[in-house]
Image (cartoon, grey):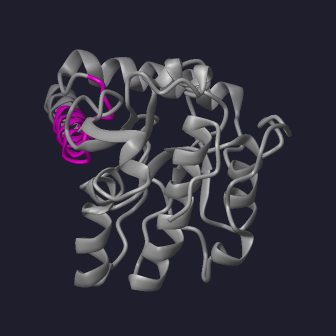
Amino acid sequence: MAARYLLAGITAAGLAFWYDFKSWQSFGTGGTPPTLQGYLKIRRWGLYLLYSRQNLLDPSPIPDSGESYINPEKVPNRPGPRPGLTRWTLPQRQVPENITAGASATLHNLMQEFASTAPYNEYIETRPSKTEGGTGPAIYVKEGVKTINPVAHKIFYEVAHVHPAENSLHVYVSPQDAKLVMNRGWGQRFPVTWIAPPSWIMVYAPRNEDEVEIVREIVRAAICHAVSMNIDE
C-alpha cells in the first residue's frame, strides 16, 4: 500500500512539474532557451529572489537622476488594480487581461510604426528582440547615432518590445520616467537586477485604445532616453 501511495505521489509531482514547464514555455521564455535546462535555471533564480524578497512595486531602488521625457498629462493614473503576475521569475509576464481588437492591432504594430515614422526613423529601427530570444520585434537605436545612451549596452541597446502572449511590454525609459510610470500604476521593476539597467521596466498591457495611447507615450519617451534628446512629431 505504501509503495502505491509513493508511486502515485511521484506521478503527480512529475505531472505538475511537466505542466509548469509547458506553461512557462507558452508565455515566451524571455530570452532564456525554452529547454528543460533553461527552465531549471529560472527556477533557481526564483529561489534566490524569493530569499532576497524584492518589492518590485517600490521605485526607490531606481536612481533619481537624468531627464524626464514623458508628458505627465499623457500618462494618468491607471484605473483598477494592478494585474497579477505569472509565477516565474523570467519571463516577467502578467496574467492576461481582456484587450479590444483595435487596441491589440495598434499595440502589436507599435514598434514598426515608430521605426517607420519621421522623425523617429532617423534614429531607430526594428530588429528581433535579443532580450526575448528573437521571438518578436523590438526597437533599437541605429548604429551611428552619436547620442546613443551608453548604459543601454546591458540590454544590447534595445529600447522596447511587446510580449505577444499577454500584451505587456518591457521598456527602457529614463529613471525619472520609470518612477512616474510605476507611481501611476502602469508598471513595475524588472526582477533580475544584474542583467538590465534599473529603469528597464515592465509596462502592463493596455486594455483598450485609450490605454494604447498611454503606452505609446511611454515608448516615445523611451526612444528619447535612448538617443539622449527629446524627439516629437
* Residue 49 percent coordinates (x, y): 60, 27
Residue 224 in magenta stretch: no
Residue at (20, 21) in percent of width and height: 36
Residue 149 higher or lower than 95, as above or below: above
Residue 84 higher or lower than 88, as above or below: below
Residue at (33, 79) in percent of width and height: 98
Q: Nearer the viewer, residue 98 or 149?
A: 149
Residue at (47, 75) in percent of width and height: 213
Which quadrant of the rendered structure holds the N terminus?
A: top left
Q: Quadrant of residue 183?
A: bottom right
Can residue 91 be spotted in the picture? no
Q: Quadrant of residue 156?
A: top left
Residue at (61, 25) in percent of width and height: 193
Left or right of residue 50, residue 24 in this image: left
* Residue 196 percent coordinates (x, y): 55, 26
Left or right of residue 74, residue 127 in this image: left
* Residue 159 percent coordinates (x, y): 46, 39
Can residue 211 be spotted in the picture? yes
* Residue 212 percent coordinates (x, y): 43, 74
Q: Quadrant of residue 139?
A: top left
Residue 30 in magenta stretch: yes
Q: From which residue to which does the magenta span run?
A: 13-32
Predominant SS of the magenta segment: helix
Left or right of residue 76, residue 82 in this image: left
Q: Nearer the viewer, residue 93 or 233?
A: 233
Residue 98 higher or lower than 116, as above or below: below
The mark total stands at 0
